[in-house]
Amino acid sequence: MVQQRSGQRIGIDARLYGPSGKGLGRYIQEITDRVVSLDKDNQYIIFLSPHSVGDCQINQENVEKVVMTERWYTLAEQLAWPKLIRRHRLDLLHVPHFNAPLICPCRLVITIHDLILTKFPSRRASTLSPIVYWLKNLAYRLVIGRAVKQAKVILTVSEFTKRDIIEQLAVPASKIVVTYNGVADFSQRRADKKLADKQVLLSYNIKQPYLLYVGNAYPHKNLEWLIRLFKIWSVNHQDFSLVLVGGHDYFYQRLAKLVASLWSGQTKAPVILPGFVPDEQLAVLYRSAALYIFPSRYEGFGLPALEAMSYGCPVVSSNSSCLPEIFGQAAVYFADNQMDSAIMAIDQLLNNPSQRQQIVQRGFEQIKLYSWATCAEQTLAIYRQLLKG
């Protein structure tokens, strides 16, 4: 139980806290952990799901953890929020996504990472029936429209997404603050590298050399296109495989069917889908890859490619959306969705050792621009500014 102290009461919606929440989960974990460690003056109410409560190891006297059983993007959470806000006497609530309470009787901060559902409203991005998908999309537009109006401050993760919010949602620029994500460092979690690296790769049936992608398989990630690209490219590079890391959900299952159809009749396809890989083993996959390839057609930030850079893995990326802003000169770019351009970029990096080393060194410099500590400090400064107001 939280002891009574001076200061105000800040709620953080952390239901997707931790690795199971993917990129958003990492953002929530880093911000939550770091903000509360910086602020011993205010009271924090951390709302967690039954699945994420075990991942959250915060233990401070000014922090109370509350299990919220209502799921994200549901009517149930909308009905629950006003009661929870009043019950816990919140002065401020930070919702790190667009699904803010439609009724929020306290100051509200939201984080918008991207507007993918606005820019790519594709039925292929959903397992829902057409009618349910249409209703969900309508609800999304209602909730995000209400959220940007209610929020005192909108945090976002790139200048690209800030411009998107201004143009798509008619939000004044003065209301939006860019707080770049950081890059997680899990490089020191294992001391025994070389021998153990081989064992980790073997456990996933991965042999070098390989091209690597890490992340979800939603349609805007362009992974079906990447698999078809690899099919063409690998004709002259038969020693390479393509490793696509992500949980075995509906979208990855769809990719598995595509792989089976493209390499039908072969005993083993050179495309490996290892499923979810924990951070300490993911580090091995990053540093052992020939390159990281990022074919996405739309991103708000592009965190996995920066993580690849932190392990000395050179990055080949599409030139879409925010990616040139975030990666700067630390990647070799290809024209969005253009196979000939992508093949040239891959070959350019693999066949030119001096350029490869230059891209690796630039990657080490680029990641220094992105710090979770800085992101948390900026976020806490916003809280304090609003609470003073």
Image: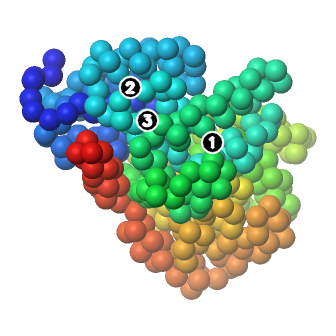
Residue shown at 53%/41% (left/top)? 148
**Identity, as a three-letter code, of the amino acid under mark 1:** Asn
The residue that disc 1 covers is: 216
Left or right placement of residue 305 versus residue 236 in this view: left
Q: Kindly give the residue lying farthest to the bottom in the view shown.
A: 354
Q: Nearer the viewer, residue 252 or 318?
A: 318
Q: Quick one: label 2 or label 1, which is nearer the N terminus?
A: 2
The residue that disc 3 covers is: 95
**Identity, as a three-letter code, of the amino acid under mark 2:** Pro
The residue that disc 2 covers is: 105
For the residue labelled by badge 1, is the local secondary structure a helix, a strand or a loop? Answer: loop
| Camera-side mark, 2 or 3 | 2
Left or right placement of residue 237 versus residue 141 in this view: right
Residue shown at 28%/31% (left/top)? 91
Q: Nearer the viewer, residue 191 or 67?
A: 67
The quarter of the picture where the C terminus appears is: top left
The image position of residue 276, as x and y in percent, is 55, 36
**CA gap, disc 2 and disc 1:** 35 Å
